[in-house]
Image: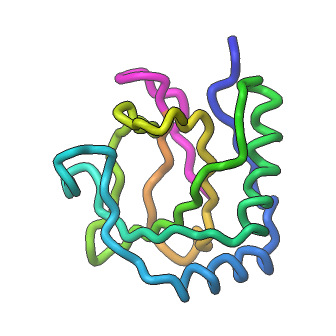
């Protein structure tokens, strides 16, 4: 059976994380939404988001996509967007179970791999656990991101 996810811990330097955070902190955030014609659905997602376009960040993330794809072996292209997402305690930030693809997308491109990077120090907050599933209700990972 193919692997369903990859995890790498502590592989991005603190300096690069600081640089990403500096760029993101200069970019205006807006309320995040989901792939839906109904607009934002706060019962599923409560977070702030901005898009990042810095090429060096994209290339950094692309290295992890290529590394992961050694296990998945799927046809991929380096043309995806990068999202910076904040989950704020005072907003009860969360993202409930969802598919990480826009099933109704009309651009002939589907998200096949997603990369999540924990930018904040997990010792500086009390956060949730990243849960991954193949399909409901089979939990395949219950991973606290360090």
Give the residue at x 48% y 51%: 129
In the image, which residues are magenta? 133-146
Residue under the point 34% across and 63% down:
32
Looking at the picture, does residue 121 appear above or below residue 114? below
Residue 127 occupies quadrant = bottom left
> 140 and 112: which one is in front?
112
68 relative position to 20: left or right: right
Majority secondary structure in the magenta region: strand
Where does the image place residue 71, in percent across and percent down from the top left? 78, 26
104 magenta-colored: no
Is 30 on the left or on the right of 65, as rendered? left
58 over 6 or under it: above or below = below
Query: In this rendering, would 102 be left or right of 122?
Result: left
Answer left or right for 98 relative to 21: left
**Residue positioned 73% across, 67% down in the render:** 57
In the rendered image, the quadrant that contains the C terminus is bottom right
Tell me the quarter of the picture where residue 117 sits.
Answer: bottom right
Position of residue 87 measured from the top left corner of the image (x, y, whole percent): 40, 68
Give the percent coordinates (x, y) of residue 140. Answer: 53, 27
- As displayed, is residue 38 above or below residue 75? below
Q: Is residue 145 magenta?
A: yes
């Amino acid at each position: 059976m193919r692997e369903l996810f990859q995890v790498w811990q502590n592989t991005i330097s603190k300096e690069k994380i600081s640089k990403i955070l500096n760029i993101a902190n200069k970019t205006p955030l807006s309320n995040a939404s989901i792939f839906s014609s109904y607009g934002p659905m706060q019962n599923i997602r409560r977070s702030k988001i901005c898009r990042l376009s810095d090429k060096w960040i994209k290339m950094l993330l692309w290295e992890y996509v290529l590394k992961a794809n050694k296990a998945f072996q799927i046809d991929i292209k380096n043309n995806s967007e990068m999202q910076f997402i904040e989950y704020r305690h005072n907003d009860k930030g969360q993202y409930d179970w969802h598919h990480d693809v826009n099933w109704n997308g009309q651009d002939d491109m589907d998200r096949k791999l997603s990369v999540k990077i924990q930018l904040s120090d997990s010792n500086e907050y009390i956060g949730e656990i990243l849960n991954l599933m193949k399909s409901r209700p089979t939990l395949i990972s219950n991973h606290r991101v360090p």
